[in-house]
Image (cartoon, rainbow, N blue to C red):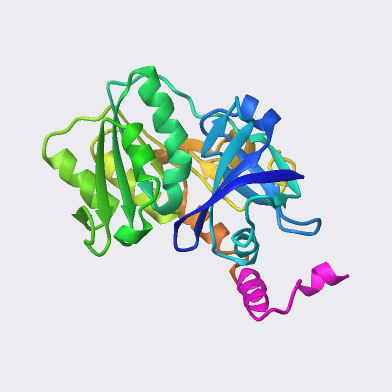
Amino acid sequence: MFKIVQRSCLAPGVHRFEVEAPLVAGAAKAGNFVIVRTAERGERIPLTIAGADRERGTITLVVQEVGKSTMEMGQLEAGDAFRDLLGPLGTPTRIERVDNLVAVAGGIGVAPLLPVIRAHKEAGSRVTTIVGARTKDLLIMCDEVEAASHEVVYATDDGSYGYHGFVTGALQRLLEAGRKFDQAIAIGPVRMMQAVCKVTAKHDIPTIVSLNAVMVDGTGMCGCCRVTVDGEVKFSCVDGPDFDGHKVDFDELCARQAFFCDEERVAKDRYQRGEGACRCQER
């Protein structure tokens, strides 16, 4: 069992957990993730490590309520525990100093982006971060992002804060103003990362994306998280999650992400109606 020592609400349906996991905290690097379960027959949920405190022996996880399993996580409080926590998994983000880095986050993509920009700033990179959300109320971890960046640009779909529009519009505006970037990192919804890559490709900016393909075991054995990169099959869990965004087949990835939408909808509906476990878990 992995005890939750602190829990806070970052935005409607978005929660931050500080979890006791000393071995994971001692080994975690920027870009690593863990797989957690709330119960013995619970779904295995991959979550990027948003922070690690080696002295306290804790890691920070950010969870957005989307389906049944994440809604169950949203009910946990300080003092509760995750049944299982496996990690750190994945290949850490390669951190090398660059003169000018632009980091783009959409939604809760801020959480996995945060340790990456922290590491880049510590390595001497000049970090410009663009953070986007649908509304001002959904912008999260702003203080931490500002501390880890030299410059932060906010964008909201409805114009309630910062640039009125998508993160790609904010990025394009910087580029049109003559800003030069040596590297880009984009983390967020698949279509958002694809859109960022279309912008950076026009300006010949190398771009890294973090892929959230459907995953089961997280060790490369099941093959569920396969993605096509530069015409080759890769596994997000062991080859990634970071890949060259200009070489990712985003259309295939989006199609694979939709494979279990119907099952996820049924499970969520049953949970919201209070009907308990799905039939496969009752056997």
Q: Main secondary structure of the magenta part?
A: helix
Residue projecting furthest to the left: 177
Which percent across, then down, holds residue 255? 53, 60
Q: Position of residue 99 (x, y in %)?
A: 27, 21
Q: Which residues are magenta?
A: 262-283
Residue 225 visible to the viewer: no
User: Left or right: 50 with respect to 113?
Assistant: right
In the image, residue 158 sits, relative to residue 27, either above or below, namely below
Q: Quadrant of residue 220?
A: top right
Q: Residue at x 59, y 37 (%)?
A: 59
Q: Residue 157's image quarter?
A: bottom left
Q: How many marks?
A: 0
Residue at (39, 50) in percent of width and height: 140
- Viewer can see residue 214: yes
Vertical placement of residue 270 versus 132, above or below: below
Residue at the image position 34 percent from the left and 44 percent from the top: 142
Q: Nearer the viewer, residue 74 or 197?
A: 74
**Residue 171's quadrant in the figure?**
top left
Q: Nearer the viewer, residue 186 or 206?
A: 186
In the displayed orientation, state which residue is furthest to the right: 283
Left or right of 10 on screen, residue 65: right
Residue found at x 25% / y 30%: 181
Q: Position of residue 232 (x, y in %)?
A: 56, 39
Which quarter of the figure is the C terminus placed in?
bottom right
Percent across and percent down for residue 32 are 57, 34
Q: Is residue 264 magenta?
A: yes
Q: Quadrant of the N terminus?
A: top right
Q: Is residue 278 found left or right of 160 in the rendered image?
A: right
